[in-house]
Image (spheres, coloured by chain):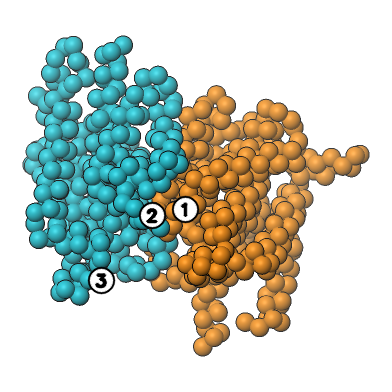
Amino acid sequence: MTQLILFNVFNGLIIGAFYALMALGLSLILNLTGVINFAHGGFLAIGAYLAYALIPYIGFWGALAVAPLLTAVIGLAVERFLIRRVYGRDPLYSLLLTFGLAFIFEDGTRYIWGPQTLPFSVPSWLNRPLSSDFFFLTGYRLFMVLLVLVAVIALFVILNRTRLGMRIRAGTTDLETVSVLGVNVRLLRNLNFGLGIYLAGLAGVLAAGMLGLQPTIGSSLIMPSFVAIIVGGLGSLPGTLLGGLLIGVASGVVTVYFPSASEAVIYVMMGLVLLIRPRGLLGEEGRVQ
Amino acid sequence: MNGSNKRAGDALVWLLLLTMPYWLHWVGGYTSLGTQVVVLALAAMSLNFLLGFTGVLSFGHAAFFGLGAYGVGMTIKYLVASTPLGMLVGVLVGTLAAGVIGALIVKLRGVYFAMVTIAFGQVFYFIAYRWNSVTGGDDGLAGWRRVPLHFGAHVIDILHNDRVFYYLVLICFAVSVAIMAALLRSPFGRTLLAIRENERRARFLGIPVDRHIWLSFVISCFFVSLAGTLYALLNNFADPHDLHWEQSGNFVIMAVLGGMRSFWGPLIGAAIFVLLQDYISSMTDNWQFFIGLFFVLVVLYFPRGVLGMIRRKAAQ
């Protein structure tokens, strides 16, 4: 029993790490531009399928390095030609636009690569269990958690230590003033979008290694990412990270006792948070209005 | 637009709706397609009560649409074989859920309101999807049919006669639309417009803004649940996708496409959307791609919708 609980908690932690990686990208974009990127799951799927297409040529490690970057480039282009045109308009329009993009990406990947689940091979030495008692603790899972950790640390270093990151944070608070101070806001929003999409692409490659590859891989992960943002607190990146891990572990634990409620539990958590603390666990006062 | 133009427009709409089963086949349609247009138009107009006239962006209305659908289906399948009772249960369930969820989210605004409504909508999707033994899971709730209406000895056969069912739906539509129009003309409706235009000023005038938004949300969801019950009756089937956020997005695009600042806008949007979907899905398996493209094009080139464009042209 302990082993079962441990297994599910650890599983939940991994899933939570995915949610967090995806939600961090969503949060970055939402905080700076007020756009809810519904197509984030679509970008995740693109990252995963690009990696699948690249593996025969440059191997798993090459694909892991290149696929998220290519996804980010696609993201930059999408921002430049489509998303940019709805900034400053009613949030309704950005929602509908990215919603349409989500359809296009999902059906596009289905058209190109087919609806069936594709095998996605990770190096075999990574897939071996590390110990016979803890059979679930494969190297790949541990590696994923570590990589997510590295990505998150890198993101926070970028945001806190680099000029770009400082500008992003400043723009989140008051974009107009940042613009008046001579920062190229168009470029800033563009790069910020690319950064968010890079995280989605990275999550896609990792998710494909664990869940297998199918066109719906992104849309199944996007709702929990929304919940992670709401639970963690709107406008707070550490909150988003916390929210992702929390709902991951919660759904893992609930799986042990009540498997069919594993999805519903995260929405119950969201309801509780909204009831007790509408701005979310680490949310700033006043951002919800 | 002046008063007589508006009355002429209203008369034209009603005339077209009343005679639809008699001319639809000339233009390549069929009666149940017309019924579908009317049902989805009711859903889109109900959403627009909140979206266009209160200025609150809900992206989760499919949840209440689907609750209505499952409410009527499960009542007829498991409890009593009665269409009106089933509809009553469906509408009650949807409205109650809206009351509870509305109370949780009424303090949120803008994108955050949208995000929370999307996420909450998914709860019911997962319940319908997972609770196989009762809801039929992914396959949907089948094995039941709408029941003919009995008035004493007189029976109205809505089951076998498509046209009769169309007129039942049209009656529900007409009553709902009349109530919404009356509400919008009342002081309550004017207050909603005031909140849409300037929430802060409305608050300073002493209007209990949150209570008004909650009420508008519940009214909107009441009519969406009604549309959901009619949709399930139309198909003799409740589909988990009725509850999915994709369906919510469809309602929003219908409202935007027709023109969300006009009362009849969502009706036109629903008609265009239903016909387009029917056409594209008969042409290609990848209809989702084209629907997505359609969303993008509407947002970029047609954000005011059909009626918004006409009104702008007329004003010039």
Query: Tag 1, which secondary structure?
Result: loop
Residue lying at 50% horizontally and 33% vertically, measured from the top left: B127
Amino acid beneath label 2 = Val
Quadrant location, the N terminus of chain B: bottom right
User: Chain B appears in which tint?
Assistant: orange
User: Chain A appears in which tint?
Assistant: cyan
Q: Are marks 2 and 3 in contact (CB under 8 Å)?
A: no
Q: Chain of mark 2?
A: A
Q: Closer to the observer: label 1 or label 3?
A: 1
Q: Which mark is residue B107?
A: 1
Q: For the residues marked 1 and 2, what is the alpha-carbon distance in whole angstroms?
A: 8 Å
Tag 2 residue: A288
Q: Chain of mark 1?
A: B
Figure check: B106 above or below B89: below
Q: Are marks 1 and 3 in contact (CB under 8 Å)?
A: no
Q: Quadrant of residue A189?
A: bottom left
Number of marks drawn: 3
Tag 3 residue: A176
